[in-house]
Amino acid sequence: MGAHIPSPPEKRIIDHIIVMATPDEVVAITTALERAGLRMADAVVEPALGLRSRMFPLGGGGFIEVACELTPGSFPHGNPFENTPRIANVSYTTADGAADMAAWAKKPGTADAMAQCGSWRREDGSMGYFVALWPIPPTGELFFALQERRLFPLPFLEEADTAPEVCAVRVYGEEAGLWQQRHRDLFELEEDGELLRAGNAKLAFDQIDGLNTQIEVTLAVPNPDVEIPLASGAFTLVHQVHRVPPTDSGPTRSIRPPHPERQN
């Protein structure tokens, strides 16, 4: 009998967030993330893309990926590392990428939608694999996607209930309205009043003409009194809500620390 493959989330959650940086910037960012209370769980190499990344688990089983080129210019598709360090990508889970692609084909603005298959080598030498679905090609400074999790599960499920969690995502700038429409029509995220929702994270979109579109991610962490150095976009840190695993005696409870005020 083959190995058990965990079922993907029934509803979309945040799969991962990519930060693009130079090697020196990677050190500064990962040091700050660790001070805030995130754990560097792995260091991976993607030879086909010329990338090296450090992975930090998130609540739900996903991760933050802090990526740099293996050597200057090693990334083969354009130059997304021209403006660093920045948050460049947020991806969401899907349990049926083929169905998503078929649905996109019937909607306007998706003529260039694509699926991307790839692999990475973990620090222990083992291989990991991914299937990403892009409504438009991942070019420019900012891109969003779905990640197929039916065959290749979220990589950090053992920390799904304990790792720091994404509370909110804010997309702001001159293309925020366009990405809001794509999140509704193509990613089909849940409506939450005037906001959208991916798992426990709420998403807001602020159209600001004349400003390059950027991403602000709010993270609940053990130590929010840390600044994450970014040139574009931002990590906003708040106090972590301590999640208590469910037991037979009742549902999951949350315990807030005594001073939950926001700090940056």
Image (cartoon, rainbow, N blue to C red):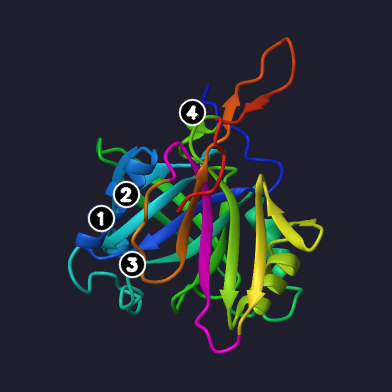
Q: CA distance from mark 4 to mark 2?
A: 23 Å
Q: CA distance from mark 3 to mark 2?
A: 13 Å
Q: Residue at x 19, y 61 (%)?
A: 24
Q: Which mark is residue 158?
A: 4
Identify the amino acid type marked 3: Pro
Q: CA distance from mark 1 to mark 4?
A: 27 Å
Q: Which mark is residue 32?
A: 2
Secondary element under disc 4, as helix, strand or loop, is helix
Is residue 213 highlighted in magenta? yes
For marks 4 and 3, the one nearer the N-term is 3
Q: Position of residue 124 (x, y in %)?
A: 25, 35
Identify the amino acid type marked 2: Ala
**Total numbered circles:** 4
Q: Position of residue 260 (x, y in %)?
A: 57, 39
Confirm whether residue 248 shows in the render.
Answer: yes
Q: Are marks 1 and 2 in contact (CB under 8 Å)?
A: yes
Using a 10 Å C-alpha cutoff, classify the residue at mark 2 as few (fewer than 14 neighbours), some (14 to 19) or many (20 or more). some
Q: Which quarter of the rendered picture does the C terminus lie within?
A: bottom left
Q: Are marks 3 and 1 in contact (CB under 8 Å)?
A: yes
Residue 242, image quadrant: top right
Identify the amino acid type marked 4: Glu
Identify the amino acid type marked 1: Ala
Q: Are marks 3 and 2 in contact (CB under 8 Å)?
A: no
For marks 1 and 4, the one nearer the N-term is 1
Residue 28 vs residue 142, the one in the foreground: 28
Q: CA distance from mark 4 to mark 3?
A: 29 Å
Would you name the residue on which mark 1 appears? 28
Q: Which residues are magenta?
A: 209-224
